[in-house]
Image: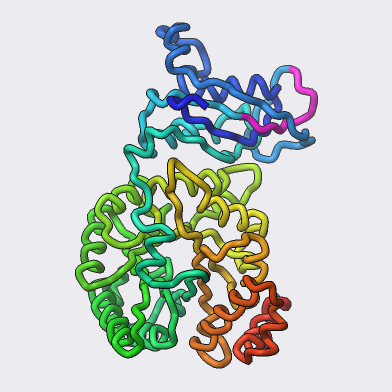
């Protein structure tokens, strides 16, 4: 692809011929509108128009996937599906993520000539690398901070999500830190609530982590949820760093990609990117976008860690989609923007094997809330069970073989295996 163009790949469903639909998309998102207007010269279209690069015909549907599509004057009764690549000149918007999104997504989803649209992937020119430096820590930097190598980074999420007092939270964190966990994150539901202000939480939790570190020699990483308005992001980040914290968390769809880039411009610690709300953008296969495309923007904007859901998890998503998301986060992007895939949602020791089999990597962060905290023998045993399960998976041993030697794994199977099969 031309180094001065952005290429976007779409899945499209339309009652019109695919070529006509592609031309409409290219025109609507660059120089055209529903009718020719003065000033829309051939020179202007040549310099600024989007180009249909490729169309691949797929299957036809007998009914529209989405409501509101108009029909052509002569309709064959079919809704034609295809994959198409459309490129946009970089000089239309420059290396700007917010304005890029207006071009490649913008009003496309409202076009009445389409009965389905999904952004599958994007190809970005090197100019974006000069504007967006990407993650400052990523996989290697996070491992270095934790001194954890050759296995996944293992941790948990604060549960109950909401309601713990500052004192109860600090006690939980110290107990888990002493149990050997690598990582704990705030739940996305809990950032700076009136009943537990962030400044008090940061002070109590960092003190608890330091006490545990003095006792064990290992300092746990805690991702404080600093999601808020842009002025709050800076203030909250500085609060965490000033107290000796080593990670901040933000809900990306709440603060926006521009908010994430702003946070990354001054962040001194890894940014744990949570993707809550993502389901509304992707659950329909006929609407929204693939995480393959979205994670590239998140990496550009500076996310060091990116949530990718989990195999056999509690939230809707196919295992194939989760696997694609995990692999996408570490695929080459503009010279090396790698992010740590964060696996969560209904996870426990028993999901390690499926995850490793699907991805063949240990460069992941594997988080288990209930799957660790609710282990019959306590959180320390929950952590041990996940660590041992990953070691067995990487060594080619089955979960059952691992359980024969390690009671913590067998106890996890007895509890979570039965619950997983009954849900």
Question: 107 or 126, which lies in front?
Answer: 126
From the top left corner, tell me how far across and down residue 292 is, in percent: 55, 47
Q: Quadrant of the C terminus?
A: bottom right
Residue that appears at 37% across and 83% down: 173
Magenta stretch, residue numbers: 74-84
Residue at x-position 62% and y-position 67%:
313
Residue at image position (45%, 27%) is: 3
Q: Is residue 264 left or right of residue 341?
A: left
Q: Is residue 388 left or right of residue 294?
A: right
How many marks overall?
0
Q: Which of these two is toward me, 67 or 61? A: 61
- Above or below, 423 against 343 in this view is below
Q: Is residue 191 above or below residue 173?
A: above
**Would you say residue 210 sits in the magenta stretch?**
no
Q: Nearer the viewer, residue 34 or 88?
A: 88
Q: Is residue 15 above or below residue 201?
A: above
Q: Residue at x 27, y 75 (%)?
A: 202
Residue 222 x, y percent position in the rendering: 36, 73
- Identify the image's colour scheme: rainbow, by chain, secondary structure or one colour: rainbow
Place of residue 353 in the rendered image (x, y in percent of width and height, measured from the top left): 66, 71
Q: Position of residue 312 (x, y in %)?
A: 66, 67
Image quadrant assignment for residue 403: bottom right
């Amino acid at each position: 692809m031309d180094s001065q163009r952005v290429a976007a790949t779409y899945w499209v469903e339309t009652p019109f011929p695919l070529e006509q639909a592609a031309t409409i998309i290219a025109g609507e998102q660059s120089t055209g509108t529903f009718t020719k207007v003065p000033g829309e010269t051939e020179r202007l279209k040549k310099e600024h128009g989007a180009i249909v690069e490729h169309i691949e015909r797929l299957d036809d549907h007998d009914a529209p996937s989405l409501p509101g599509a108009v029909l052509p004057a002569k309709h064959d009764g079919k809704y034609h599906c295809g994959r198409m690549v459309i490129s946009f000149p970089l000089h239309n918007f420059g290396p700007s993520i917010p304005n890029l999104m207006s071009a490649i997504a913008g009003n496309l989803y409202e076009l009445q000539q389409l009965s389905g649209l999904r952004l599958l992937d994007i190809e970005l020119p090197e100019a974006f690398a000069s504007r967006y430096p990407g993650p400052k820590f990523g996989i290697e930097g996070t491992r270095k901070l934790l001194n954890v190598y050759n296995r996944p980074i293992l941790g948990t999420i604060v549960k109950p999500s909401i309601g713990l007092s500052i004192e109860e939270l600090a006690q939980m964190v110290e107990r888990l830190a002493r149990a050997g966990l690598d990582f704990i994150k705030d739940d996305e539901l809990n950032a700076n609530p009136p009943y537990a202000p962030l400044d008090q939480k940061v002070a109590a939790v960092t003190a608890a982590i330091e006490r545990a570190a003095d006792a064990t020699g290992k300092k746990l990483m805690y991702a404080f949820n600093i999601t808020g308005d842009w002025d709050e992001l800076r203030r909250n980040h500085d609060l965490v760093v000033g107290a000796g914290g080593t990670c901040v968390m933000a809900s990306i769809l709440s603060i926006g990609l521009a908010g994430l880039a702003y946070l990354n411009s001054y962040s001194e610690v890894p940014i744990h990117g949570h993707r809550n709300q993502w389901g509304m953008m992707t659950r329909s296969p006929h609407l929204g976008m693939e995480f393959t495309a979205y994670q590239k923007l998140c990496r550009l904007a500076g996310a060091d860690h990116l949530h990718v859901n989990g195999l056999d998890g509690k939230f809707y998503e196919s295992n194939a989609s989760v696997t694609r998301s995990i692999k996408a986060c570490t695929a080459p992007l503009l010279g090396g923007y790698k992010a740590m895939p964060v696996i969560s949602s209904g996870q426990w020791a028993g999901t390690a094997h499926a995850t490793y089999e699907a991805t063949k990597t240990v460069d992941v962060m594997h988080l288990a809330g209930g799957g660790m905290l609710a282990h019959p023998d306590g959180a320390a045993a929950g952590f041990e069970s996940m660590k041992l399960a990953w070691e067995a998976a990487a060594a080619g041993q089955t979960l059952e073989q691992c359980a024969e030697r390690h009671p913590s794994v067998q106890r996890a199977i007895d509890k979570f295996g039965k619950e997983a099969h009954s849900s």
